[in-house]
Image (cartoon, rainbow, N blue to C red):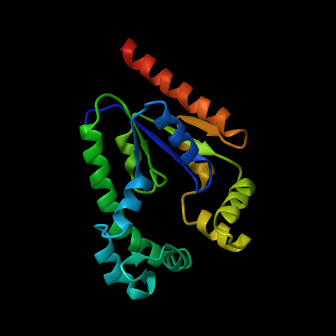
């Protein structure tokens, strides 16, 4: 895989999806791990048989995955989260690899668990979306109508965002207006293209 790959990562509710969306809208090739994961777990998705086998009918409404029921299980027990990741991650990684190979020129790879699954080794540079934890908790609670404790549990299921921030080449703070942080990401993309052209 001799391609210029930019990793885009960040903690849960750190504004990464907004950056990814803005990049896509401006014609940047973005490979989205969450999008791939959703496709794998949608109706008739390739991951559903293995999820049903491991977690049973309790996480399904007929043929549809009950995402809330599954989330309640995996975010309350690290072993259950590990089991789910063991099903999904190999499938997601294989699809990302396929899409990278099929994309012309440099590409942005949007992966929340970039460091956790070792995909930072695929990247020539890494950008991290960041907000302080207090804002993370507020956003997670607003998104899922859950308690402070539940929000913290979800945040702590990932590598601390401060650690991701420390490891990244560029940090994009996203507390301000969405358009502002989106413009920073687009500026980083333009800078990357310029550097590649100068090589």
Q: Quadrant of residue 124?
A: top left
Coordinates of residue 103 in the picture (x, y in percent) = 29, 35
Location of the C terminus by quadrant is top left
188 is higher (above) or lower (below) than 195: below
Residue 33 place in picture, x, y as percent? 41, 52
Instruction: Give the vertical position of 171 relative to 36 (above or below).
Output: above
The residue lying at 73 percent from left, 59 percent from top is 138
Residue 114 located left or right of residue 186? left
- Residue at x 30% of width, y 70% of height: 44
Image quadrant in which you'd find residue 35: bottom left
Image side of residue 131 versus residue 65, left or right: right
Residue 83: name its quadrant: bottom left
Q: Is residue 191 above or below residue 170?
A: above
129 displayed left or right of 193? right
* Percent coordinates x, y for residue 8 in the rendering: 49, 42
Work out whether residue 157 or residue 20 is closer to the camera in this orientation and state it.
Answer: 20
Q: As displayed, is residue 117 above or below residue 83?
A: above
Q: Image point 38% across, 15% down: which residue?
A: 197
Residue at 25%, 46% in the rendered image: 98
Of 94 and 18, the residue lying toward us: 18
* Number of numbered discs: 0
Q: Quadrant of the N terminus?
A: top left
Q: Nearer the viewer, residue 31 or 1?
A: 31
Pick out the residue farthest to the top: 198
- Say left or right for 54 vs 13: left
């Amino acid at each position: 895989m001799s391609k210029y790959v930019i990793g885009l990562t960040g903690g849960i509710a750190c504004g990464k999806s907004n950056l990814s969306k803005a990049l896509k809208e401006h014609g940047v090739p973005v490979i989205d791990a969450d999008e791939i994961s959703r496709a794998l777990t949608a109706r008739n998705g390739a991951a559903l048989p293995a999820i049903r086998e491991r977690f049973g009918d309790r996480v399904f409404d007929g043929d549809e995955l009950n995402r809330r029921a599954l989330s309640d299980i995996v975010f309350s027990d690290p072993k259950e989260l590990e089991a789910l990741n063991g099903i999904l991650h190999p499938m997601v990684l294989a699809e990302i690899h396929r899409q990278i190979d099929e994309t012309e020129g440099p590409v942005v790879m949007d992966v929340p668990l970039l460091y956790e699954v070792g995909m930072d080794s695929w990247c020539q540079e890494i950008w991290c979306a960041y907000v302080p934890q207090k804002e993370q908790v507020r956003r997670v609670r607003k998104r899922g109508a859950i308690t402070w404790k539940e929000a913290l549990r979800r945040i702590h299921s990932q590598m601390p965002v401060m650690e991701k921030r420390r490891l990244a080449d560029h940090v994009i703070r996203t507390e301000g207006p969405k358009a502002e942080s989106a413009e920073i990401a687009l500026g980083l993309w333009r800078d990357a293209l310029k550097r590649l052209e100068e090589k």
